Image: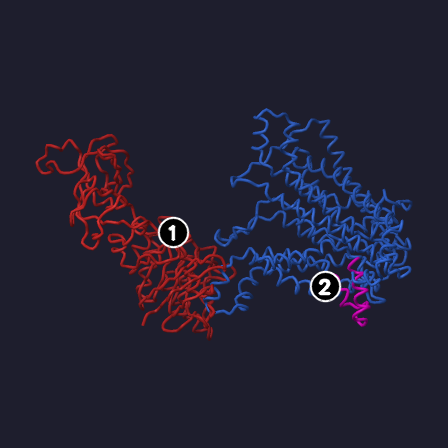
Chain colours: A blue, B red
Amino acid sequence: MVRTFDAGWASIASSLWRERTLDTTVTSLVLVIGVVMGCLILAVPTAWLLARTAIPGRPFFLVTAALPLAVPSYVMAYAWIAEFPGMSGLWAAILVMSLATFPYVAIPLTAALSTIDAGQEEAARSLGLGPLATARRVTIPMAWPAAAAGLLLAALYTLSEFGTVAIFRVDAFTRVIYTAYRASFDRTSAAVLSLLLVVLALLLVVIEARVRGRAQRWRIGSGVSRPAPRQQLSPGATAAGLTWLIGVALLALGVPAWSLTRRLLESRQTDFDVAEMISAIAGSISASASGAAIALALALPIAILAARYTSRLVKGIEGAAFLGHALPGVVVGLSLVFLTLAVLPAAYQTLITLAFAYAVLFLPKAIGASRSSIEAVPPALESTARSLGRGPLRAWFTVTGRLAWPGIAAGALLVLLTAMKELPATLMLRPTGFDTLATELWTRTEVEAFGSAAPYALAMILLASVPAWLMGRWLARTPEVGTPYSMRNPRARHDEGVRADEIAYVGDAR
Amino acid sequence: MSALALDDLVVGYGGPEVVRGVSLDVPDREFWAILGASGSGKTTLLRAIAGYLRPTSGSITVAGELVAGPHTFVPPEKRRIGVVPQEGALFPHLDVAGNIAFGLSGNKKTARARVEQMLEMVDLPGLGNARPHELSGGQQQRVALARALAPEPTLLLLDEPFSSLDAALRSEVRTQVRALLREVGTTTILVTHDQEEALSLADQVAVMANGRIQQVGAPWSIYEAPTSLGVARFVGDLVELPVQTIDGAMAQTPLGVVPVAEDARTEAGITTDTRLVLRPEQLVLVADRQVGDATSGERGTHGVVQSISYHGHDSLTTVRLDDGAVVAVRAPGGSGVAPGDAVRVMVTGSGRLFTDPVV
């Protein structure tokens, strides 16, 4: 951001007030608002059908409602444009981004609707409220925080998404910044726009944190809550519900699957270079693995402090790390370009800079996963190890670290897989001639070589489904079987349902 | 040489001090209990002794070696103090043998022999390969004890080790642990809020409240000769009576004239706050239909039974005396009366006088 101020205030002011800046802001806001509306329209009926009705095929539709998270949004955009080459502009972007992000809302909302205690709704009815009034005064207020947190995540995701808006040629912040940087090396304008984008994103993060903070207060009482019974629908309503669920699944999954399969079959006849594919996979893995390693090294000390101490300083450090949530890849890419050129030209466009960008972007994921698994280890175990003659470091590694490592490793794996999907920062920071799956897909889509892009798109989906699969297992988890009750941390929350920010660990493909 | 010496120890977490000047001298091979309600500072004191917390001031000396003082702080791993935490806190990723061997250094063969010996000692032979979650609560506690004792600590700290066990198991495990520790002879400090546990297990009991030690003594003296009304109330049920007049060794109370214990008389005279206290088992209940009985004569104070709580081995009966005072009477087995019955209450032994404000 120093770059911004180097240019002098006059120049900043002039680029800030240029008509194009205003246009970009309006375009981005319309895009975000459109996606938020789209998410609501897609998620609310879906969540209600899945949580409150005895719709046939419920387990299947639960999966299809979560599965779009496994398709990186620009892969989805590629699939749509490959099938309908005429698609472009704001509406196309809103449609695809809504389809890609609505699980952020649908999953927590389904969880919230199915865990709301039936007793509370029954109490409202017995106090003289009709079904609609009950929904308005009881159900919606209780489910709203879950949905709101998910909506804000979808908004944040949309604001920082690069691939989709670029594919549909929408002049939102990320694309304008990237074009300004690429085409004219118009640094000041790119920097000013980045700053504006970060401010908007930060605003969303702050709102999200507030909504989430309030959401946690909704659980009162320790009694076992009894979920609401699922309503039996009339045949007509069942048909309508099924049509809806199938329709959403077709749009979000069917179209990409169909388009991809078709292109894949085509690509077998055209040029498919195995060597190129292998080098792209190797590039993806080497860059992301280095990024994951750096992220882990940065995350562990923060996670340990955050799990065991709650001082203001620790909260500050953790909060600063979470700002990574608000930093779009394009901004991190741009600032590292400036930084390396200004401070350490030797590091410009090297693997290490790229890995560092991944670490900055995905640090929150690594911290989140490590922190919760460290928190789950009772501190008494570590102090007992000390009393048995182990020094502080050995005690940590033989007890806490040993017990928490599955969570810590999962966090690192999550960073690795997410980094593989990252596009804009990779484009800006990669060494010349260095290719990853994401950049290969990107270059081919840009020249509309849809057929030869298909194998890369498929590889991306396969990669992306690993965290989605992990999350599926995590959603199905029960308290670890065989753990004596005393080993469980009272702070571990087994019963809070699914929170949108936890899903964000998985679906993020910026 | 004492196994543990605390000198004016002050411990806190940055806010108000939690342990506020504790001095104790625990002789070698003794079993002590620190008894206090929750919030009394007893667990903080234990954490400071173990080395988990750095004291604000004062000193801790273990077996003649200063481990915490103005310029000294020995970390927990160098103190040779064994700790049995609440609920055992066994390492879930290690089997029983791995847990017991955790604090052992040196070659594998001696370690394995030591583990076998410890398993034998806590009466769990052959369970070395079991996982902690396969054990019952009582077995987990015994493994935790074996783990703490395996490196032969100079001092053993027990942090409410029995509180997570259910009642039936608790007394069984307690007895086993006590017998075992008597055999091993390791100096032990038990921290507990359970007065029955402290009184029945310890050689010496230190009662703690508000971060200070209120009284140190043998269990019987804590119960029968408490030095303050606070301690008296904390360690058991109490009959508290106002004192109307006092004449040397005899106090006039609603239960008639009661002798005052020799070491608890007051020179200062009495005030309206002065209380004579007795334990409920010092009172005897006689049904009023035996009034004409020559042996009981006219002795005792008249009252009416209010309620009875029956415990099997004894029962506690509340009686409202004719002047309005309410007293509790403990009798072995049932008392043979029913609520509403007219009774007489008689006193055996002597009471103790307190004028001090309750701490």
- Outermost residue on the bottom side: it is B107
Secondary element type, mark 1: loop
In the rendered image, is residue A252 in sight? Answer: no
Residue A291: assigned label: 2
Q: Residues within 10 Å of mark 2 (few under 14, many from 20)?
A: many
Label 2 vs label 1, nearer the camera:
1
Q: Is residue A359 magenta?
A: no
Residue B211 lies left or right of residue A353; in this view the side is: left
**Mark 2 is on which residue type?**
Gly
Q: Which residues are magenta?
A: A331-358
Badge 2 sits on which subunit?
A: A
Is B186 situated above or below B326?
A: below
User: Toward the viewer: A196 or A209?
Assistant: A196
Question: Is residue A426 left or right of B18 when viewed as pictured?
Answer: right
Residue A387 tag number: none
Identity of the amino acid at label 1?
Ala
Q: Residue at x 44, y 58 (%)?
A: B17
In percent of width and height, residue B190 lies at 36, 59
| Chain under disc 1 | B
Residue A372 percent location from the top left of the image? 60, 55
Image location (x, y in percent) of residue A353: 77, 66
B310 or A156: which is nearer to us?
A: A156
**Which mark, by number, is residue B37?**
1
Q: Nearer the viewer, residue A354 or A133?
A: A133
User: Distance of mark 2 from mark 1, alpha carbons?
Assistant: 52 Å
Q: Nearer the viewer, residue A89 or B150?
A: A89
Query: Which SS type dominates the magenta stretch?
Result: helix
